[in-house]
Image (cartoon, helix red, strand yellow):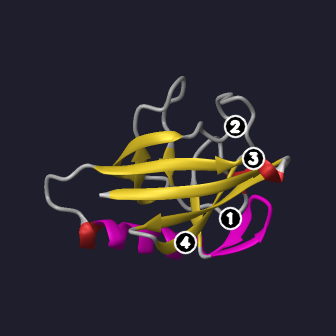
Amino acid sequence: MELYLHRIHYRNGTNGAIFHKQQFLCFSIELPWRLNLPNLSCIPDGTYELELFYSPSFNHNLRVKEVVDRSGILTHPANDALNELRGCIAPVSQLTGIGKGLGSRKALDLLLMRIEGFKEWDEEVTLTILSDLSGR
């Protein structure tokens, strides 16, 4: 199962949109691109395997596996990238500004339900991230 994140980098954050089979699922917010510095930057473009994950802090979410020079990258709820994220991806239902949004838990739940509904039991789930640098 393949998901796609198309995003635009800005000085104070990164906004994106997540798709499955060319259907829009939700928006996303992240930290700005800062050369992949841990805790300060969004992750690089590429294709990553996702796995369902549970953490006490965020409950059900997705782990982004094998990010170069990074660890602990998740897709979890947050509504303000600069104040709530340390390199992770936050799905949101609505964008309210650069790196800001609303309805993050709802958007993540929708994403998780989509994966559960379409994924075959032994199928890998991937996220391909592509950036448009024109927002800089």
**From the viewer's perspective, is residue 8 above or below residue 18?**
above
Please tell me the numbered disc located at residue 133. 3
* The stretch drawn in magenta includes residue 125: no
User: What distance separates the C-alpha of mark 2 from that of mark 1?
Assistant: 16 Å
Q: Is residue 56 left or right of residue 45?
A: left
Helix, strand or loop at mark 2: loop
Q: Please name the amino acid that badge 4 sits on.
A: Cys
Q: Is residue 134 left or right of residue 29?
A: right
Cα separation, mark 1 vs mark 4, equals 13 Å
Q: Residues within 10 Å of mark 2 (few under 14, many from 20)?
A: many
Residue at position x 68%, y 64% in the image: 79
Q: Which SS class for mark 1?
A: loop
Whichever of callouts 3 and 1 sits on the residue coming sooner in the sequence is: 1
Of residues 94 and 82, the one nearer the viewer is 94
Highlighted magenta segment, given as a residue range? 94-115
Cα distance between the residues tagged 3 and 4: 20 Å
Which residue is labeled 1 in the image? 79
